[in-house]
Amino acid sequence: ICIFFYRQDPFIVCMETVTAFVEGPMSFLTVWAFIKSYPSRFLLQLCVSLGQFYGCVLYFAVEWMEGWSHGPYNHPLYFWFYVVFMNILWIIIPFILIIDSWVNLAAAQSKCDDQVVRKKR
């Protein structure tokens, strides 16, 4: 099966390899960081979410540029449920988490900046 996918779609194999060996362990590390309330938790969340978001956007872009050649285009179950709906979740959820990370990291930076200004007075 792996040889079939490699010959048919090397992009998916490469992206899933990165997901398995980088994003997967980082996801567990992120969960651990949130459980333990480590200061780096939002940075880790941002990195994992950006990786997932970027990978899925590339997946859609490559499929679109290749004319949706890896499956039956416009098939109600395969295309609309599997390709569109199931993969759009990997864009929406990471996007929400990117915004959450942004808000929390910006608030932390703002607090640090306020402390620096107070010390200078």
Image: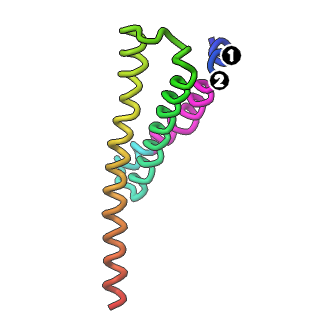
Label 1: few (<14), some or many (≥20) within 10 Å?
few
**Position in image of residue 74 (x %, y %):** 41, 11
**Position in image of residue 11 (x %, y %):** 61, 27
Which residue is labeled 2 in the image? 10
> Could you tell me which secondary element the residue under label 2 belongs to?
helix
**Position in image of residue 51 (x %, y %):** 49, 41
The colouring scheme, among rainbow, by chain, secondary structure or one colour, is rainbow
Q: Is residue 23 magenta?
A: yes
Q: Residue at x 66, y 19 (%)?
A: 6
Q: Residue at x 41, y 8 (%)?
A: 75
Foreground residue among 76 and 13: 76
**Type of amino acid at the residue the image marks with label 1:** Arg
**Type of amino acid at the residue the image marks with label 2:** Pro
Q: Residue at x 36, y 9 (%)?
A: 76
Magenta extent: 11-29
> Could you tell me which secondary element the residue under label 1 belongs to?
helix
Which residue is labeled 1 in the image? 7
Q: Is residue 85 magenta?
A: no
